[in-house]
Amino acid sequence: MASTTNSPSTLLTLPNFSIQTSTFLPKTSQRSIFQKKKPFNFNSKRVVSCKASNGKQNDADHTSFLNRFDRRDILLGLGGSLYGATSLVRDPLALAVVPIEPDLSSCGESTVDTGKTCMNVPCCPPKLKDSKIIDFEPPLGCKIRYRPAAHLVDRDYLYKFESAMERMKALPVDDPRNFMQQANIHCAYCNGAYSQVGFPDQKLEVHYSWLFFPFHRMYLYFFERILGKLIGDPDFAMPFWNWDSPCGMTMPQIYLDPYSPLYDENRNLEHQPDVLVNLNDGKSVVKPKKKKEKDSFDELTKREQIKSNLYVMYQQMVRSAKTASCFHGAAYLGGCVSETDIGCTPEPRGGTIENGAHIAVHKFVGAKNPPYNEDMGNFYSAGRDPLFYAHHGNVDRMWNIWKTLPGKKRHDFNENVWLNSSFLFYDENANMVRVKVRDCLDSKTLGYDYQSVDIPWLRSRPTPRRSRPGVGR
Ligand code: C2O
């Protein structure tokens, strides 16, 4: 296996501060009310290798930061404040010219760290003999394949989809298109297997920043192309989990048959249908002031849950997502340790949907087993559940929908540093392909779109209710 060489011995630490910088980014409006602390198991920016963490994690002191910046020679500006000192900030323009790129040769173990327990897992892609990297070209042709809503597919479609998944799972284990290898892509990009090109000390991580939507789009794109190839149907389109609509708010039935290749036993069995997903992640929309009220909220009727979910969607797609920065999340630049790195991002955070409904659905599906809540409840294992790809189909669909909403600022970033950031994937022919963010802005250019279904939250514009008479006991 081509995996665990070059395991990162460098100690990377994430200090807990952000810094005000003048920024080249569009100014964000207020922080979303949905902005949360990272959920317990989704702390994948903490890419400190377990081995290195023994007692050394408090290395995040002022000195080590200074040293690191000096070494990389990108500390240009002074000003701002760090631990109360007004002396250190990187020039955001200096960072702005360095897009993020994974260094394939640096691939080492991924680290899963809950804060209490930690483990290293091998997730690197297999090395193939001819490992030339090709630059991605969008497909020729104008035919659009439409991804169907998972709860609406018919038997013929299901048969096709299942055979494709079966074949993907049956590929040799060291074939990069094998299902487990595909799952490992997520683990590698989300749990710090790669260093950044040009910054051997800095890990690459695709969550909680503006890399979130582009990375996951292309990840699914190649997954889908591989499925299509395996059944000889290049027009095959994967289903999406329509969790933003009342008819799709339970786990889709096609993923629940234990004999199906779409099944995964590592899920929360208490969340089988008819249990509706709570897009607000277990929290009430109107924050209950009294504990008693909270108890009754837990017993929301279905109707209330649906209403609440639609409200969440409206918030995260419309009200709180008026700019690219709100929707996509903060900038994440080459040389940054993470979104919490000093000067790297003006506001360390993921976008509204990423932090909100996206995480909520992960947690809804993942098993309750501590400490890692596999599969969907942890980034390192999420790709092992076929439902992951349907979930992210809908996340990706939100990107498309968001761009169609009215509002002058509701368009993607146009900063080159974002557009030129890139990822590496094996394509359906097992060729290594480099994809830039600029290649994936338009799903139609990539040859796919989504079945048009109702978008009920769009017109509902709910207002939170102060009281909910009749709810509860
Ligand atoms: Cu990369 Cu939903 O996670």
Image (cartoon, helix red, strand yellow):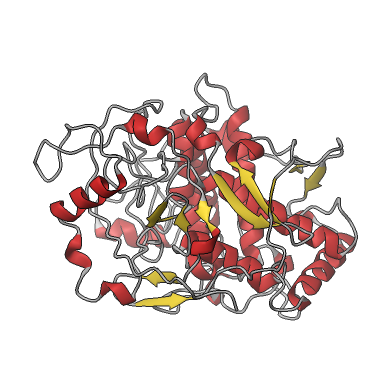
On the picture, is 104 further left or further right than 372?
Answer: right
Q: Which residue appears at 77% of the width and 50% of the height?
A: 148
Q: What is the quadrant of the N terminus in the image?
A: bottom right
Q: Nearer the viewer, residue 270 or 32?
A: 32
**Relative to 169, does residue 407 appear above or below in the rendering?**
above
Q: Position of residue 117 (x, y in %)?
A: 33, 77
Q: Position of residue 381 (x, y in %)?
A: 53, 71
Q: Is residue 320 visible?
A: no
The residue most toward the left is 85
Q: What is the quadrant of the C terminus in the image?
A: bottom left
Q: Position of residue 362 (x, y in %)?
A: 51, 61
Q: Which residue appears at 55% of the width and 27% of the height?
A: 411
Q: Nearer the viewer, residue 13 or 269?
A: 13
The residue most toward the top is 408
**Relative to 36, does residue 30 appear above or below in the rendering?**
above
On the picture, is 8 further left or further right than 393?
Answer: left
Q: Is residue 391 visible?
A: yes
**Relative to 462, does residue 376 appear above or below in the rendering?**
below
Image quadrant in which you'd find residue 351: top left
Image quadrant in which you'd find residue 90: top left
Q: Which residue appears at 19% of the width and 74% of the height?
A: 55
Q: Position of residue 101 (x, y in %)?
A: 51, 48
Count of numbered labels shown in the rendering: 0
